[in-house]
Each structure stands twice: as structure tokens, then as C-alpha cells.
Amino acid sequence: MIRNHQNIFILGLPGSGKTTLGRILAKELLWDFEDSDQFIETMEGTTIKNIFNTRGEKYFRKAEYLYLKNFSSNGVVVATGGGMPCQAKNISLLRKKGALIYLKCPVSVIINRLSSGDKTQRPMIKAENTEDLVIFYEKLIKERESFYQQADLIFDCQQNTEIVVKTIKQMLF
């Protein structure tokens, strides 16, 4: 059994379904839900894409760190930004503040999801076509996988969401 489950942080690549799963899980647990990127957008008064374009990724990563450092809630399911756990200080802060769930998703599934959605909302994606998008995501997963693998629980993003939620509840509570 995982000891620290005062909060739940969902990790994974952009497009893996963190927000979707997080909302459903929070509702099932009767907990609050928070998307760290949306929180940062509210605090900064602008979009993540605009932060990247005007202030840079380094500024955004510092905002993520400050979000985690000042996070003092209990009973919250948080969909993290895809790169949040991939900063040295952040993974240890996440562990101290709750259980970590990695929503592992094949690149092909993410590409399919992005092709039917609005990838312009994702600030790091600069790919112009599907081939570039595949290359981008394959590089991203290589950079981030070792951080994501430190999660307490790992689920395939293609699993039935209700089954994943039920399993999380059984394993954490």
C-alpha cells in the first residue's frame, strides 16, 4: 500500500489523458481537482503558450516549481504539466505531497488524439506535420520516461478509465 496519498498527482506526456482521468478520479473520491497548467495560467494572467513565447521555458519551469513548493492542500487530484516531474527538485516535492500516478501512453495514441484536437494549445509542440510530431514525442518520452517511472502506480492510458479509477481507489485506500 502506498503511504502518502493525501493528494494524487497524475504524470504523463501532453495528450496522455491526465486531465480527463484526474477529473473523473477527483469526482469519484469527492476530492477537488486541479490542473497545474491552468493554475499557473491564472496566477500569471496569461496562457502557457504565451509564457513560453515571451518569458521562455526556464521561467515557466520556475513557476511550476513555485506551484509545487507552495502547494499545501490535501484531498486534491492534480493533473501535472507534462514536464513538471522532470525537474530535479520537483520529483521529490511531488513525492512529499502525495501519491504519483503515471499515465503511460504510446506515442501513436497521443498523435491520434492530437490530430483530432487542438495541438496549438500545447506550447512545446512545434511540429508542422505528423512525422515531425512523432519525432518530437519520441524524443520527449526518452527525456522524461525515467522521471515518470518513479511514480507509485503506472497505468496504460488505453485502459478503461473506470477500471483505472477503481484500481487506484483499491490500491491507495
Image (cartoon, rainbow, N blue to C red):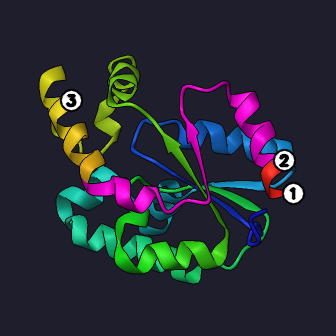
Which residue matches tag 2? 170
Q: Quadrant of the C terminus?
A: bottom right
Near mark 2 (Cα within 10 A), the count class, few <14, some 14-19 or many ≥20, is few
Q: Is residue 97 above or below residue 51?
A: below
Count of labels in the image: 3
- Circle on res. 173: 1
Asked which quadrant contains residue 28, the reply is top right
Q: Is residue 166 left or right of residue 98?
A: right
**Residue 66, image x and y in percent?**
46, 80
- Residue drawn at x 18%, y 39% is 136
For the residue labelled by badge 3, is the local secondary structure a helix, a strand or a loop? Answer: helix
Whether residues under marks 2 and 1 lie with C-beta atoms below 8 angstroms apart, the answer is yes
- Circle on res. 114: none
Which residue matches tag 3? 134
**Residue 37, image x and y in percent?**
46, 56
What is the span of residues highlighted in magenta in the rendered image?
A: 143-170
Amino acid type at circle 2 is: Gln
Q: CA distance from mark 2 to mark 1?
A: 6 Å
Q: CA distance from mark 1 to mark 3?
A: 38 Å
- Residue drawn at x 38%, y 28% is 110
Amino acid type at circle 3 is: Val
Q: Is residue 45 left or right of residue 137?
A: right
Q: Is residue 61 above or below residue 79?
A: below
Q: Is residue 36 magenta?
A: no
Q: Earlier in the sequence, mark 2 or mark 3?
A: 3
- Residue drawn at x 80%, y 57% is 172
Q: Nearer the viewer, mark 1 or mark 3?
A: 1
Q: Earlier in the sequence, mark 1 or mark 3?
A: 3
Q: Is residue 76 left or right of residue 53?
A: right
Amino acid type at circle 1 is: Phe
For the residue labelled by badge 2, is the local secondary structure a helix, a strand or a loop? Answer: helix
